[in-house]
């Protein structure tokens, strides 16, 4: 069965003046293990809303989301989230940021240390392990954010325009890193992007949402072969 199943999901927000704002409507979607889904759509069509509902950060006004056969009722370590602006803990070092999740969950200190260093090596930041967050560039922060999510060994990674704020060269670099990580970990990835080329080069399936209130308008399987 599918790793993620979204059934008739809709979301209506309420503004401060009590007006209703329909953000997404009638979303039906099945995502299998190992897929790399890219979501495209006009600004305001509800991409972030959908991602937050999948993450369990928000509850839909109607419909249901099932993850691994169970109804989503809140966030889970098994579904890691990376946002456009890195949300690292500024009072923790690079290495401590990566080890944060495992520490909260009470894992063994030595294991956390080992895992954090291995992950920092994988994202190319080993020599920056003791730096403070403010010493890092935007691209480096996103590498830390990725490593921090991976430290929890999630099955699914949700990314909301993770490379949107980076310069072109850094973005290209990070695309390679994300592709490598996906191939190694066999994670299921759902990524929002505004960049069609990025979606085509990374994704196995492209979902296009219609304007607000958004729904999945088109779905394309991407025939990808890496050279
Ligand atoms: P996208 O990510 O595609 O740009 P969003 O999910 O951020 O779309 O927003 C979809 C619509 O819902 C927009 O009109 C936005 O203003 C509105 N919206 C998003 N979050 C909230 C919120 N917390 N309260 C009220 N309206 C919201
Ligand atoms: P994105 O760039 O991913 O579309 P936004 O910058 O639109 O995100 O939104 C950032 C945050 O503000 C999100 O958490 C979203 O839910 C919230 N938000 C967006 N639109 C509104 C709104 N009209 N009212 C209240 N919160 C909103």
Image (spheres, rainbow, N blue to C red):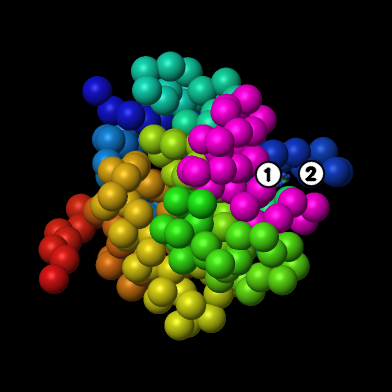
Give coordinates of residue 20: x percent, y percent: 71, 40
Where is mark 1, residue-wise?
Answer: 21
Quadrant for the C terminus, please. Answer: bottom left
Q: Which mark is residue 213?
A: none
* Nearer to us in this view, 22 or 175: 175
Residue 211 on the magenta segment? no
Quadrant for the N terminus, please. Answer: top left
Q: In the image, what residue occupies the spot 75% across and 67% down?
A: 134
Q: Quadrant of residue 186?
A: top left
- Residue span colored magenta: 90-116
Give coordinates of residue 106: x percent, y percent: 63, 25
Residue 109 on the magenta segment? yes
Q: Residues under labels 2 and 1: Cα distance?
A: 7 Å
Where is mark 2, residue-wise?
Answer: 15
Label 2: how many residues lie within 10 Å, few (<14), some (14-19) or many (20+)? few
Q: Taking 107 as reference, is 150 above or below it?
A: below
Q: Is mark 2 within 8 Å of ligand 1?
A: yes
**Comes first in the chain, label 2 or label 1:** 2
């Amino acid at each position: 069965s599918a790793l993620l199943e979204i059934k008739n999901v809709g979301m209506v927000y309420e503004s401060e003046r009590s007006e209703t704002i329909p953000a997404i409507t009638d979303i039906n979607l099945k995502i299998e293990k190992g897929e790399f889904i890219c979501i495209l759509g006009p600004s305001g069509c509800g991409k972030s809303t959908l991602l937050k509902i999948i993450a369990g950060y928000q509850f839909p006004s109607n419909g249901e989301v099932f993850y691994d056969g169970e109804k989503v009722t809140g966030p889970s370590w098994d579904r890691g989230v990376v946002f456009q602006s890195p949300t690292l803990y500024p009072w923790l070092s690079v290495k401590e940021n990566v080890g944060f999740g495992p520490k909260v969950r009470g894992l063994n200190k030595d294991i956390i240390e080992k895992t954090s260093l291995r992950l920092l090596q994988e994202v190319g930041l080993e020599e920056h392990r003791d730096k403070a967050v403010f010493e890092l560039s935007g691209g480096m922060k996103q590498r830390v954010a990725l490593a921090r999510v991976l430290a929890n060994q999630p099955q699914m990674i949700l990314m909301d325009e993770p490379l949107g704020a980076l310069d072109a060269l850094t973005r290209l670099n990070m695309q390679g890193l994300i592709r490598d990580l996906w191939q190694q970990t066999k994670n299921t990835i759902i990524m929002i992007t505004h960049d069609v080329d990025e979606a085509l080069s990374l994704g196995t399936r492209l979902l296009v949402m219609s304007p607000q209130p958004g729904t999945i308008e088109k779905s394309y399987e991407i025939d990808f072969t890496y050279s």
